Amino acid sequence: MPRFSNSQLLVLAVLLLGIILSMADLLVVSVGVLLLIFAGLLFGVFLNGLSRWIARRTPLSYLISYLVVVTVIVLLIGFSMIYLGAQVAQRSDKLWSELQTAVQQTSERLRQYDLAEQYLPDSSQVQDMLTQQGSTMLPKMLSGLQSIGWAMTGAFVIFFVGMYGAYNPQLYHDGLLKLLPKERRQRGTEVLLQLRSALGLWIVGRLISMAIVGVLTAIGLWILGVPLPISLGVLAALLTFIPNIGPLLAAIPQVLLALNVGTNTALYVILFNIALQGIESYLITPMIQRHEVTLPPILTISAQLLMAVLVGVIGIMMAAPLVVVAMVLVQMLYVHDRLGDRHPGQLTSS
């Protein structure tokens, strides 16, 4: 066995560490790409389900229904970008200015307390911070533009993967089944159908929850006199797509803008969000989950935290549907087939 000197061992250790780190970084990038493809498949499940629903209830074929759905979605996206783009930009600027004012007023209120004043920066410190940030403004702008570019690329990937997947789903269905032994293809068909059904129902449930939460949030904030209730309602609807974590993120700008109105208003907004989440958790979600996969909150939150650490925002967004996939596969392939337990508790309730 050859002997290595200490310097050679050190070089080998450094090379091995570099290989491990490179593989880990490559794995994270690969997981991010796979999650984008998975998001595209989710969009494809939505297109496929909506097209099949139209084809069953109208004389149109699946292909014509699919073309109608895609055309309507493209027109809606184009209309939103052209007609509403300027209004959204104006509201975003107003929302940002309102948030800045709310943060400043909150800081001034906190300065009234001796304990908080010890930790809050004074005006000179704030000026120094702004000066230091000004020197790094260009790198931050470039980083922001890069993030926007990646987000647009991801959106295009999701859209086209979903569109092509829904155009001819049987092609990919048959291709996956050919990877299995012939005696397992029938079971593979059952698993794929269950996965499509579970994911489709989960998407429908999320869309219903998003619409209800968005409308109720806009109405509630309008009644309470909070600025920009419609913008905050749209933001709450979009963030509701992320179970558990999304509503918490949506409540932050609401409370900040409510502080700009008054302390009592902020308290009412907090109570309103608690009540709204109670309604969503104990009334809206159970009604929806009569026909969709019931996700254990602890499992969902754990998956969200893990995916957030690994791949960031896309991981948080895709954690819940990945849990749906995992639950279906575990129940059908392990609990049913491996353990032989056909009635361990259903993933979906009839």
Image (cartoon, helix red, strand yellow):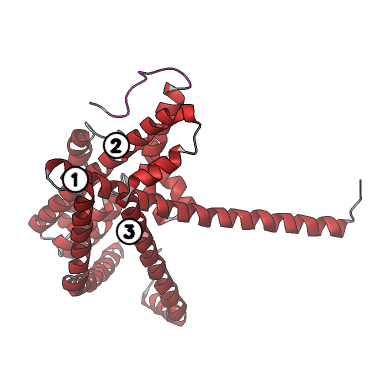
Label pair 2/3, CB-CB below 8 angstroms? no
Occupied quadrant, residue 69: bottom left
Q: Determine whether the residue tagged by mark 2 lies in a helix, strand or loop.
A: helix
Alpha carbons under labels 2 and 3: distance apart: 20 Å
Q: Nearer the viewer, residue 219 or 205?
A: 205
Which mark is first along the chain, 3 or 2?
3
Query: Which SS class for mark 3?
Result: helix
State how far apart marks 3 and 1 are (Cα). 21 Å
244 or 162, which lies in front? Answer: 162
How packed is label 2: few (under 14 Cα within 10 Å), some, or many (20 or more)? some
Extent of the magenta region: 338-348
Kind of residue sitting beneath label 3? Phe
Q: Quadrant of residue 152?
A: bottom left
Lower position in the chain sequence, tag 3 or tag 1:
3
Of tags 3 and 1, the one toward the viewer is 3
* Residue highlighted by disc 1: 208
Callout 2 amino acid: Ser
